[in-house]
């Protein structure tokens, strides 16, 4: 089990990423939290950059996602500030299975950059999902394919719509890359799924679900169907979506108050999702059948804090059908905090 996260060192007000590897008994095998801090970089002043974005990104650093390639190398991707909050970079680091650094790279297609998801394709090349902006007028979704060998950029694709586009998660299927995210214009939020494919990563298909839906995580089952979890924005309800490889919708579900952030599929096709359920002061996950009907709620112990971003995030199923979950306190929703972050993992026997 490998976990990525964030720690704030209050003694010097610096944020650094953390990567921890555990064995099957939950014992730590190795960790790396001595990651480089980015120093102020020269950049042209951008008068259109709103102060809100600068404050959002000040003193911030976090690994958002993690993946393992066919050789058990570990790849983490996230967002770190540079230039005293005036600039942020996509940061990718690759380790071998023993925790030795293979390489690290930064990517700056924009002035403000966010890296939210990472996936590995059949060639062990790396796909980074996120977005960014050069001005306050638009925020573009971004997919970058980089070489697993050395981190060299193979291609980069942007997705533009009116307002904001951000990709939050990504999976691969043969030569295709399926990116999940959302777009926002005025008060409207639309879930967006884009398929990129071929040697050049051209856009091949797209699914948009209107009606204030936000997708946070996408996975693929053994039948090459895709499951998405997230939330409906205005009602703040759980949202689940399943569609096939041709982007035909199989079902949509979700009435429970709260939101879902992580999802995984079990061997029998049942779906496990993690997140937050309104009115319950415990860490939360739920089990669904393959048709999206809820089978049971899983209450996993009292929350450490009453903060709105203290919830279950990542979730995975191992070869024994056991469920591994990672809890991150002070993470994605609240980008900055004066509190130290804590994180831990738990294994649930099914």
Image (cartoon, helix red, strand yellow):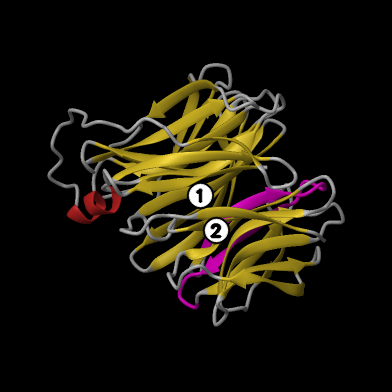
Q: Is residue 141 visible?
A: no
Residue 115 lies, in percent from the top left, at: 44, 41
Return the residue found at the far bottom.
Answer: 279
Q: Residue at x 27, y 46 (%)?
A: 13
User: Which region of the structure is painted magenta?
Assistant: 214-235
Q: Residue at x 23, y 53 (%)?
A: 55
Give the left or right position of residue 11, taking residue 197 as reference. Answer: left
Please name the residue that numbered disc 2 is placed on: 215
- Quadrant assignment, res 173: top right
Give the left or right position of residue 301, taking residue 90 as reference. Answer: right
- Quadrant assignment, res 231: bottom right
Camera-side residue: 269 or 185? 269
Q: How many marks?
A: 2
Residue 12 lies, in percent from the top left, at: 26, 43
Camera-side residue: 29 or 5? 29
Please name the residue that numbered disc 1 is placed on: 168
Is 341 included in the stretch rendered in magenta?
no
Q: Secondary structure at mark 1?
A: strand
Crowdedness near tag 2: few (<14), some (14–19) or many (≥20) residues, C-alpha within 10 Å:
many
Q: Residue at x 68, y 23 (%)?
A: 123
The quadrant in which the N terminus is found is top right
Is 216 included in the stretch rendered in magenta?
yes
């Amino acid at each position: 089990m490998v976990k990525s996260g964030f720690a704030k060192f209050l003694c010097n007000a610096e944020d650094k990423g953390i990567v921890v590897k555990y064995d099957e008994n939950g014992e730590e095998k190795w960790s790396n939290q001595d990651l480089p801090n980015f120093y102020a970089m020269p950049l042209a002043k951008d008068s259109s950059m709103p102060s809100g974005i600068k404050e959002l990104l000040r003193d911030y650093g976090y690994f958002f996602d993690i993946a393992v390639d066919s050789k058990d190398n570990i790849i983490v991707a996230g967002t770190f500030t540079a230039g005293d909050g005036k600039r942020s970079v996509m940061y990718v680091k690759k380790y071998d299975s023993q925790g030795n650094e293979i390489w690290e790279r930064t990517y700056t297609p924009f002035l403000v950059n966010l890296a939210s998801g990472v996936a590995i394709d059949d060639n062990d090349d790396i796909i980074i999902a996120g977005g960014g902006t050069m001005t306050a007028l638009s925020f573009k979704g971004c997919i970058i394919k980089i070489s697993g060998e050395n981190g060299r950029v193979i291609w980069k694709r942007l997705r533009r719509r009116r307002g904001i586009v951000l990709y939050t998660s990504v999976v691969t299927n043969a030569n295709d890359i399926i990116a999940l995210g959302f777009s926002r214009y005025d008060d409207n939020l639309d879930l967006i799924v884009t398929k990129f494919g071929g040697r050049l990563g051209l856009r091949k298909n797209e699914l948009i679900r209107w009606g204030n839906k936000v997708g946070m995580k996408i996975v693929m089952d053994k039948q090459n169907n895709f499951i998405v979890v997230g939330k409906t924005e205005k009602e703040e309800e759980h949202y689940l979506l399943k569609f096939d490889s041709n982007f035909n919708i199989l079902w949509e579900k979700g009435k429970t108050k709260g939101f879902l952030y992580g999802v995984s599929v079990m061997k029998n096709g049942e779906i496990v999702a993690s997140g937050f359920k309104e009115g319950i002061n415990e860490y939360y996950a739920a089990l669904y059948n393959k048709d999206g009907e809820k089978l049971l709620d899983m209450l996993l112990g009292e929350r450490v804090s009453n903060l709105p971003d203290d919830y279950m995030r990542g979730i995975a199923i191992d070869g024994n059908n056991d469920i591994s979950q990672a809890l991150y306190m002070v993470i994605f929703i609240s980008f900055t905090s004066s509190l130290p972050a804590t994180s831990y993992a738990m294994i649930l026997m099914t």
